[in-house]
């Protein structure tokens, strides 16, 4: 039986979405898998296992809740809370649970051990480690057969979170969380890919552990279809005459691409019992100045020229309302999680926005701070518990999205009369998600050291 639709200021909790919408997730995997070539040595088939009792327990962390927030500029604002898993407090939970379930299925079917290896700026690694720890706790796999190694830039130290995989020296060695010294944060992708290639090319590692390199966009798009399912089943009825935009803090917009795929599959009948499918919404992208490339691609403009005020030292511009009017730096970095430059996903997002509407905005940390009290008020019904002091915040996704919503309203970037659905994709501080202890991290100066750590992990 479907739960009741959300009513004003009353949240609706949708439990275990990966189980509830399994048929749509499976349809997404089949759709995306049909266009893939035969998996190579560092990939697993895009095949979603049927949930049994143990997998249902494992998927229990994939809850979503729906909240009606206070109106902004007279428009209705709804939030999809994608950060209910207390072990991650970000939306990366969904794809991570799905990937680990696929790894477990591979282990059961082939008898081959799997180590998941991924570059990360922080949150993706935290979620994969949490998912592997859940696999251990629920008994669907143990460390003798399933492990994970994450590689983050050393600059992301403050993003590293505690995890049961760091509880003992044995678990830490088998599931290393590596901080690599790189010149640019995004370089961890190249470093990790090179390490995996070197491991696979070594004849001495043949027939030991299957290394699964997990940067494929489809690994995330498949699980993120649940967002469209939740909206279709649980958001309040949508007036077809009222436009609707989805606001999301993005680095590569994987989540919005997953939503769009889910919407398409629902329109094609992937879940016959979901009748309330809204018109495909517009997308409102929120980024920061350190990596604004998706907004630049969307607008077709160049980064505006900032002038430094000799009196207060701040940088200002008034040429483009999509960019901060004031900032402490023209390359302002709000959160190192948003580290991807020139994402290939712009080629998919731009046509969606041209077809269905939308826009984008780049926010500065200073603009977030100027609206901090209002953002905390807006976020309160979600249970995000934003700290009184912004200095205590470690994950800024939700804050950026809500600030972008406020600025979009102030500057007329979001048309009047447009409803907004905010993807609440991440928010935590050290009190809500404790940081990793020093002995839970491994530091590496370069690729050779990362490769040695990988070899030790599967020894």
Image: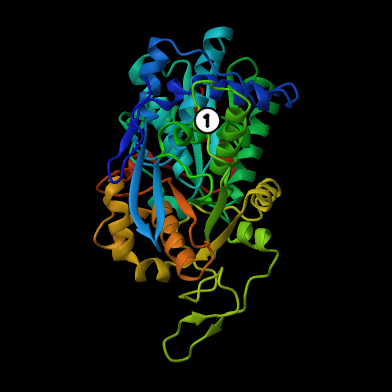
Residue 283 position, x and y percent, is 56, 51
Horizontally, residue 144 falls left or right of residue 361, namely left
How are the residues colored?
rainbow
Q: Secondary structure at mark 1?
A: helix
Residue 11 position, x and y percent, is 30, 39
Q: Residue at x 42, y 62 (%)?
A: 403
Q: Report the front residue among 385 and 163.
A: 385
How many numbered badges does the structure rendering display? 1
Q: Report the front residue among 420 and 32.
A: 420
Residue 425 position, x and y percent, is 43, 45
Residue at the spot of label 1: 223
Q: Is residue 201 visible?
A: yes
Horizontally, residue 280 falls left or right of residue 154, namely right
Residue 35 position, x and y percent, is 74, 27
Q: Residue at x 62, y 33 (%)?
A: 264
Q: Is residue 41 visible?
A: no
Q: Residue at x 48, y 40 (%)?
A: 124
Above or below, comparing residue 176 to residue 459 in the picture: below
Q: Dividing the image into 4 quarters, which one contains the N terminus?
A: top left
Horizontally, residue 129 falls left or right of residue 286, namely left
Characterize the local packing of mark 1: few (<14), some (14-19) or many (20 or more) Cα atoms within 10 angstroms.
Answer: many
Q: Report the front residue among 205 and 86.
A: 86
């Amino acid at each position: 039986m479907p739960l009741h639709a959300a009513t004003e200021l009353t949240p609706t909790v949708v439990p275990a979405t990966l189980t509830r919408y399994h048929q749509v997730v499976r349809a997404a995997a089949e759709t995306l898998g049909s266009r893939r070539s035969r998996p190579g040595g560092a990939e697993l088939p895009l095949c979603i296992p049927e949930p049994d009792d143990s997998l249902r327990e494992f998927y229990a962390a994939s809850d979503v809740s729906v909240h009606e927030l206070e109106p902004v500029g007279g428009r209705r604002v709804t939030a999809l809370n994608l950060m209910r898993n207390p072990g991650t407090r970000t939306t990366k939970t969904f794809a991570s649970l799905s990937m680990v379930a696929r790894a477990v299925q591979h282990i059961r079917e082939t008898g081959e051990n799997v180590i998941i290896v991924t570059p990360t700026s922080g949150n993706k690694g935290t979620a994969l480690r949490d998912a592997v720890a859940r696999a251990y706790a629920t008994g669907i796999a143990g460390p003798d057969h399933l492990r994970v190694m994450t590689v983050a830039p050393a600059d992301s130290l403050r993003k590293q979170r505690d995890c049961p995989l760091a509880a003992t020296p044995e678990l830490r060695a088998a599931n290393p969380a590596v901080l690599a010294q790189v010149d640019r944060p995004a370089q961890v992708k190249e470093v990790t890919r090179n390490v995996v290639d070197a491991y696979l090319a070594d004849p001495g590692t043949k027939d030991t552990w299957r290394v699964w390199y997990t940067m494929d966009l489809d690994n995330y798009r498949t699980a993120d279809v649940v967002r469209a399912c939740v909206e279709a089943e649980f958001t309040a009825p949508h007036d077809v005459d009222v436009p609707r935009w989805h606001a999301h803090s993005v680095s590569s917009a994987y989540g919005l691409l997953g939503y769009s795929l889910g919407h398409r599959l629902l329109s094609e009948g992937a879940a016959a019992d979901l009748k309330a499918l809204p018109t495909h919404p517009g997308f409102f992208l929120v980024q920061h100045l350190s990596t604004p490339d998706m907004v630049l691609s969307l607008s077709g403009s160049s980064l505006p020229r900032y002038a430094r005020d000799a009196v207060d030292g701040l940088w200002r511009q008034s040429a483009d309302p999509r960019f901060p009017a004031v900032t402490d730096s023209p390359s302002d970095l709000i959160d190192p999680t948003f580290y991807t430059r020139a994402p290939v996903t712009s080629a998919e997002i731009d046509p969606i926005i041209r077809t269905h509407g939308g826009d984008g905005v780049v926010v500065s940390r200073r603009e977030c701070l100027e609206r901090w009290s209002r953002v905390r008020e807006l976020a309160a019904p979600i249970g995000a518990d934003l700290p009184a002091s912004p200095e205590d915040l470690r994950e800024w996704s939700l804050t950026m999205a809500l600030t972008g919503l406020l600025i979009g309203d102030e500057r007329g970037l979001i048309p009047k009369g447009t409803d907004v659905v905010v993807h609440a994709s991440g928010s935590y501080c050290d009190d809500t998600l404790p940081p990793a202890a020093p002995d839970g991290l491994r530091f590496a100066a370069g690729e050779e050291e990362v490769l040695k750590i990988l070899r030790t992990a599967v020894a």
